[in-house]
Image: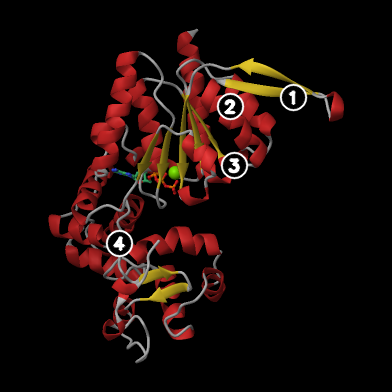
Amino acid sequence: MDHEAVTEEEDDALSAWAQTGDGDIEGTLRPRKLDEFIGQPRVREQLELVLESARRRGVPPDHVLFSGPPGLGKTSMAMIVAAELGAAIRITSGPALERAGDLAAMLSNLAPGDVLFIDEIHRIARPAEEMLYLAMEDFRVDVVVGKGPGATSIPLEIAPFTLVGATTRSGSLTGPLRDRFGFTGQMEFYTDTELDLVVRRAATILDIAIDREASAEVAGRSRGTPRIANRLLRRVRDYAEVRADGKVTVEIARAALAVYDVDELGLDRLDRAVLTALTKSFGGGPVGISTLAVAVGEEPTTVEEVCEPYLVRAGMLARTPRGRVATATAWEHLGLVPPADHPGRPDQGGPASFEQD
Ligand SMILES: Nc1ncnc2c1ncn2[C@@H]1O[C@H](COP(=O)(O)OP(=O)(O)OP(=O)(O)O)[C@@H](O)[C@H]1O
Ligand SMILES: [Mg+2]
């Protein structure tokens, strides 16, 4: 019986993966245990303490939130939390929880100690969010029976569980929700050295022959992001197989990355489109995010969540109270000269004088 339950759990997890569009490759490359996880030393140490202490006390750990830009390992970490606890994981996402009833059904089906993973938790609808408050705090849901003035709410006890949330926008989480997480793991961009390890690990798993110089080249162009590192490795492998003998050398890597429009800093087409619009169309800014997004034909959230964090970290774009501004580095990277009075010029104070949020 127990055994069957586990099999069902795994089935659920598999179908949920299929829905995320991650494909099998990401599944194969996903680190399974904490000590297999490369990088994020701070988050790993903090999480290790949270999990180990809960294990010793024999209780489910506090609710955990992972936040940070796409592809840095939030989903992987959520799976690891369950694996490290030897717990079953139930997977859903904010947008899927449109009706509070859907969440109520999930919550009341949890077994003691289960992990409930809610991806994109910032997109959860209000009624479901309010239900979650009570569930997280008191392991209880209030089921409303009937409608109108005659409606009554029946409190229903649920099993103690651990909620793991993931978000690319911790800023848009409401205060009450954020406060109910006992631990927030803030995922940071990876260093080139860490990404080099990611690339070599993936190359081993996928049986790709890549030399040291080539793996460093791929790592250096991965925008601090393991998902991108793994993707570029696969594209470089394709090139090596089709145009050469399958071995990835640094020359092969460079030629392949040129084909895929990845520049020396790892900026892709959209990153460059944003910088180009910012400099050429808006004179370097400041310009509002929605205006900038329209100029590159993208959703503001995509520009804000996918492009911006890395451009900010690479020192090419600054967020100011009046809008986005190109820094001197950005102008230089595009081979352009900023106008004389532009604040991005070093002699006008440079990027350091901008407020960054
Ligand atoms: N520390 C790591 N070591 C090795 N590979 C990693 C690591 N972190 C992430 N990856 C790889 O990157 C892929 C993306 O990671 P993951 O899905 O966990 O990111 P995410 O933060 O959930 O992204 P999103 O915000 O888009 O959901 C994984 O499938 C895995 O292959
Ligand atoms: Mg994810």
Nearest-to-viewer mark from 3 and 2:
2
Answer above or below: position of 249 versus 172: below
- Going by the picture, which residue comes out furthest to the left? 212
Mark 4 CB lies closer than 8 A to ligand 1:
no
Nearest-to-viewer mark from 1 and 3:
1
Calculate the distance from the C-alpha at mark 4 to the C-alpha at mark 2. 53 Å
Which residue, given by chain and number where applicable, does mark 3 sit on?
124
Residue at image x 37%, y 64%? 356
Which residue, given by chain and number where applicable, does mark 2 sit on?
134
| Residue 327 on image: x %, y % | 34, 76
> Which image quadrant shows ligand 2?
top left
Residue at image x 27%, y 36%? 44
Calculate the distance from the C-alpha at mark 1 to the C-alpha at mark 3. 19 Å
Nearest-to-viewer mark from 4 and 2:
2
Nearest-to-viewer mark from 1 and 4:
1
Which residue, given by chain and number where applicable, does mark 4 sit on?
239
Q: Which of 122 and 306 is in front in this view?
A: 122
